[in-house]
Image (cartoon, rainbow, N blue to C red):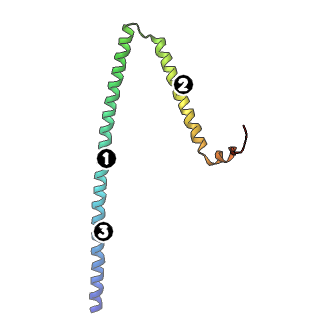
Amino acid sequence: MDSWTAMGWVILGVLLVGVVLLVAGVLLTWQGRRQLAGSLKYLLDRLGVVEADVRQLDEALALLQAQLRRRGLVDEEDLREVRRELVEQHQREAEQQELVRRLAEPELAARLVKNPSDTLH
């Protein structure tokens, strides 16, 4: 009889530990989801702020363009030229970043010719 009583206490203890772990897991999951929801809400709020800032910048740009056109300081050809220059600049920057990225690759670094210090140029 004592062996069944001891076995019963062991089983009861294991069940109690299981229930405690289950409750703790549920609470941690709930807390994690609440934190995740809070983080998502924060990110969405920040995205709304960024969208509002972009709208304000677009309005300011439209106002500046209208003012410059009204004064005769800029026309459509000037704007196209500026856009073309910006696109070319972005392309050059992208190409430079690609070259830097490729130089960091180990297989390309192995193919580069090293310049010993005792070489004359």
Viewer-nearest of labels 2 and 1? 2
- The residue tagged 2 is 88
Q: Are marks 3 and 2 in contact (CB under 8 Å)?
A: no
Q: Is residue 53 above or below residue 9?
A: above
Nearest to the observer: residue 53 or residue 3 = 53
In the rendered image, residue 76, in percent from the top left (x then y), is placed at 46, 12
- The residue tagged 1 is 39
Q: Identify the residue shown where x is 48% and y is 20%.
A: 83
Q: Which mark is residue 21?
A: 3
Which quarter of the figure is the N terminus placed in? bottom left
Q: Is 67 on the left or on the right of 117, as rendered?
A: left
Disc 2 marks a residue whose amino acid type is Glu
Q: Is residue 83 above or below residue 99?
A: above
Q: Tell me the distance, in whole angstroms, between the alpha carbons under discs 2 and 1.
A: 38 Å
Helix or strand or loop: what does disc 2 sit on? Answer: helix
Q: Is residue 17 above or below residue 85?
A: below
Residue 95, quarter of picture: top right
Q: Residues within 10 Å of mark 2 (few under 14, many from 20)?
A: few
Nearest to the observer: residue 13 or residue 116 = 116
In the rendered image, residue 112, in percent from the top left (x then y), is placed at 68, 44
Helix or strand or loop: what does disc 1 sit on? Answer: helix
The residue furthest right is 120
Q: Identify the residue shown where x is 32% and y is 29%.
A: 53
In the rendered image, residue 79, in percent from the top left (x then y), is placed at 46, 15
Residue 31, quarter of picture: bottom left
Q: Are marks 1 and 3 in contact (CB under 8 Å)?
A: no
Disc 3 marks a residue whose amino acid type is Leu
Q: Tell me the distance, in whole angstroms, between the alpha carbons under discs 1 and 3.
A: 26 Å
Nearest to the observer: residue 116 or residue 31 = 116
Which quarter of the figure is the C terminus placed in? top right
Disc 1 marks a residue whose amino acid type is Ser
